[in-house]
Image (cartoon, coloured by chain):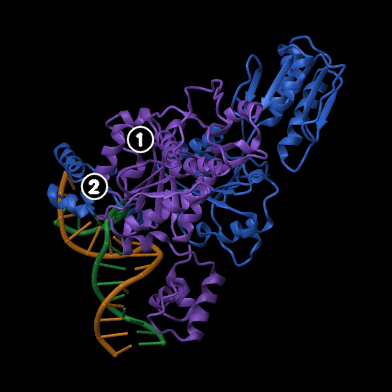
Chain colours: A purple, B blue, C green, D orange
Amino acid sequence: MIRSADVAKQAGVSRATVSVVLNGRTDVGISEATRLRVLETARALGYRPHRSGRAIRSGKTGNLAFLLSTFNERSLFSPRLLDGLIDGAAEHDQHLLVSRLSDEKLTDVQFVPKILREFAADGLILNYNSAAPERLFELITEARIPTIWINDRRDADCVFPDDFSAIYQATERLIADGHTQIGYAGWHPGPHFSMHDRLEGYRAAMNAHGLLESTALLETESIVTLSEATAVVCYSPDVVRILREQLPENNIQLVTPHFERLENLTTLLLPDYPLGIAAVAQLMQKIEQPERELPPVTVAYV
Amino acid sequence: MIRSADVAKQAGVSRATVSVVLNGRTDVGISEATRLRVLETARALGYRPHRSGRAIRSGKTGNLAFLLSTFNERSLFSPRLLDGLIDGAAEHDQHLLVSRLSDEKLTDVQFVPKILREFAADGLILNYNSAAPERLFELITEARIPTIWINDRRDADCVFPDDFSAIYQATERLIADGHTQIGYAGWHPGPHFSMHDRLEGYRAAMNAHGLLESTALLETESIVTLSEATAVVCYSPDVVRILREQLPENNIQLVTPHFERLENLTTLLLPDYPLGIAAVAQLMQKIEQPERELPPVTVAYV
DNA sequence: CTGAAAGCGCTTACAG
DNA sequence: CTGAAAGCGCTTACAG
């Protein structure tokens, strides 16, 4: 293992100089020749600074932890969300720790997840919707660790997709096309905030233009009958198949949590990558000012 | 932030005693009363040991890094694989760091991923199939970090699903049922080792029983015609739909990388969770003895 | 502009 | 059985 002392010795400078050069500090004047010599020596030796050294000195681990449920309904999870988090973390020079917890584990009062038992990350990104086990809230509070909630609408410290605006926007597109009989085919408002927000987005758009609502709320993938509607805003791609038999494609607006655009269909996609980026940005702010409650952040569908 | 010194002071012992008690060391005799007092004090204070402190002392970060490509064809990735890795890491008292790299980034010789630029993990689990960018190999070698390859068949230090045996076993089931005209519907051997292994598994089973091969190798989801076959071993679930129109369900054996069993169909599933567990176990061994080349490990389909 | 010293939180010998 | 001391790799004042 190469230490900063090895680089210093080899380059003929002190450890402090190595640190200053490698961290690109500009407040300390270092001769260009020395700077280059240190950089080159570090490279040649394959020096990889030990994160823990800095961590213990700075009080910051340089790690962010991403926590989700093994129970898929509880957590939004996609490779793109993970990419957003990883890229976001990298932008802020942080590593991303990942952990998944089962509800069963969380019901055990003895159980404390490793990530909360130790000080191994500077902050937490929680990917648990509103139905998260009560015990989880306790654990977070006890650990007193800066936390941002992702995909949950709360009073503060959260980042979530703007379902309201997405549906609102989709509805307005149909209105702009001259439609007055516009249906909404989505799910019954359920435990997740987004179900409620989408319905409200539709209602708000219709009301704003003095139009009458015509909703077909779904319990499952039941058949949609919106006989009087000439156009439909819809959330479930499963329903599109049925709608397509009844309506021209131009008259269907899809807003979807899936990532694939359906052929010839105007589609708004869940912004999972930007969600990850935004969540990390919020968490960094939260880490800097742990006491301050951050106002909720919405991320637009794309 | 609560430090071990705080716990020591509060409990009226030295920091060393706190360390010994909290790490459950048995080689040092500690009175039961003292032990309980330290544990209770730590709990009451909400003490969370700073990983970096131990890391810097022990030379081990306690982190394992999982590295994959943003290019999906390069990396096997599923929530269950991640669960396997996370649970495996937890078993060994390690955290899991995750990072994804795009091929473009890796073509840039200047670019060194954060995880290799710093010493932040004790070892690496690489989820890159054989077609990984050349630069990646260089980077790993330069960093001299214990590494296990997952889902790639190499000479050493790798963990991969046993595609050969899965297909062999599926073929033998049909032979045991009395079939002699057995087809294999899979993909042309391509860059990934598994394509080759599956075909060989089929061939080996047929040869072992003196039967003639009848393969329909697929380029895409083309129609399968195995007119003389009374039974088929098949890898692609897409092909099952077509086969089902030609054959009774009992005469189809599916081996699949997807996680869902098809109704009424004998199916062998890719063992992604066990793969994660096994990969971590191998990596822990590799970290302990970095010089030693570990023989390849296969994980059976389930 | 550079270097010696101190200290971050932890654990491990070692002395009592 | 317990505690004082040393040291892991790093960075940050501070003295020269």
Please tell me which residue lies in front, B60 or A236.
Answer: A236
The vertical placement of A295 against A30, above or below, is above
Tell me the distance, in whole angstroms, between the alpha carbons under discs 2 and 1.
28 Å
Residue A48 appearing in the image: yes
The chain containing the residue under callout 2 comes to B
Residue matched to label 1: A130
Q: Secondary structure at mark 1?
A: loop
B64 left or right of B168 in image: left
Q: Residue placed at 30% from the left, 48% from the top? A: A156
Q: Are marks 2 and 1 in contact (CB under 8 Å)?
A: no
Q: Is residue B138 visible?
A: no
Q: From the top left corner, tell me how far across and down residue B256 is, in percent.
A: 66, 28
Q: Which mark is residue B47?
A: 2
Q: Secondary structure at mark 2?
A: loop
Counting from the top left corner in percent of width and height, residue A281 is at 41, 56
Q: Is residue A61 above or below residue B236?
A: below
Give the residue furthest to the top. Answer: B178
Q: Residue at x 43, y 70 (%)?
A: A4
Q: Is residue A248 left or right of residue A155?
A: right
Residue type marked 2: Tyr
Q: Is residue A43 above or below residue B275?
A: below
- Alpha-carbon neighbours of circle 2 within 10 Å: few (<14), some, or many (≥20)? many
Q: Position of residue A164 (x, y in %)?
A: 43, 41
Residue neighbourhood size for the residue with mark 1, other residues' Cα within 10 Å, grouped as few (<14), some (14–19), many (≥20) = some
Which of the 4 image quarters holds residue A127?
Answer: top left
Depth check, front residue: A235 or A39: A235
- Location of residue A143 in the rendering, given as x and y in whole percent from the top left corner: 27, 45
Q: Are marks 2 and 1 on the same chain?
A: no
